[in-house]
Image: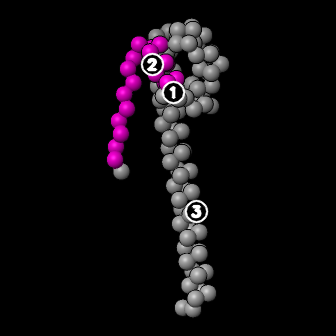
């Protein structure tokens, strides 16, 4: 293989690796968002089990009702602090599990 052909091959290989890396990143972000959506859905179900309206609950936990609605519908990305506020308002504890790849 001549130098030019080798360069093109390596360049293509590097471009393929970059595309795979970007695809992996998008996939991880998608999984992350799915997990957040599941967490917020579970918290919303607990709120409803406690017969709390969003308005009542927003006052209890100190989060605007509009923000709570957005988070519960999966249209926002809550911070850990926000999730902790919601959990405190529901009188529940949040725990996390980390797994090594």
Q: Earlier in the sequence, mark 3 or mark 1?
A: 3
Q: Which label sits on residue 40?
A: 1
Badge 3: how crowded within 10 Å, few (<14), some, or many (20+)? few
Q: How many marks?
A: 3
Residue 88 drawn in magenta? yes
Residue that sits furthest to the right in the current view:
66
Residue located beneath label 2 in the image: 87
Q: Which residue: 53% across, 66% down? A: 17
**What coloring was used for the rendering?**
one colour
The answer to whether any part of residue 78 appears in the image is: yes
Highlighted range, magenta: 81-100
Q: Nearer the viewer, mark 2 or mark 1?
A: 2
Q: Earlier in the sequence, mark 2 or mark 1?
A: 1
Q: Which residue: 59% across, 69% down? A: 15
Q: Earlier in the sequence, mark 2 or mark 3?
A: 3
Helix, strand or loop at mark 1: helix
Badge 2: how crowded within 10 Å, few (<14), some, or many (20+)? some
Place of residue 76 in the rendered image (x, y in percent of width and height, measured from the top left): 60, 31
Place of residue 45 in the rendered image (x, y in percent of width and height, measured from the top left): 48, 20
């Amino acid at each position: 293989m001549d130098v030019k052909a080798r360069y093109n091959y390596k360049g293509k290989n590097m471009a393929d690796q970059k595309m795979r890396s970007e695809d992996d990143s998008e996939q991880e972000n998608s999984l992350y968002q799915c997990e957040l959506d599941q967490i917020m859905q579970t918290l919303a179900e607990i709120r409803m089990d406690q017969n709390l309206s969003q308005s009542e609950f927003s006052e209890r936990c100190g989060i605007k009702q509009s923000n709570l609605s957005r988070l519960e519908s999966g249209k926002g990305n809550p911070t850990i602090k926000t999730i902790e506020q919601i959990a405190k308002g529901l009188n529940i504890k949040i725990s996390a599990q980390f797994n090594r790849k």
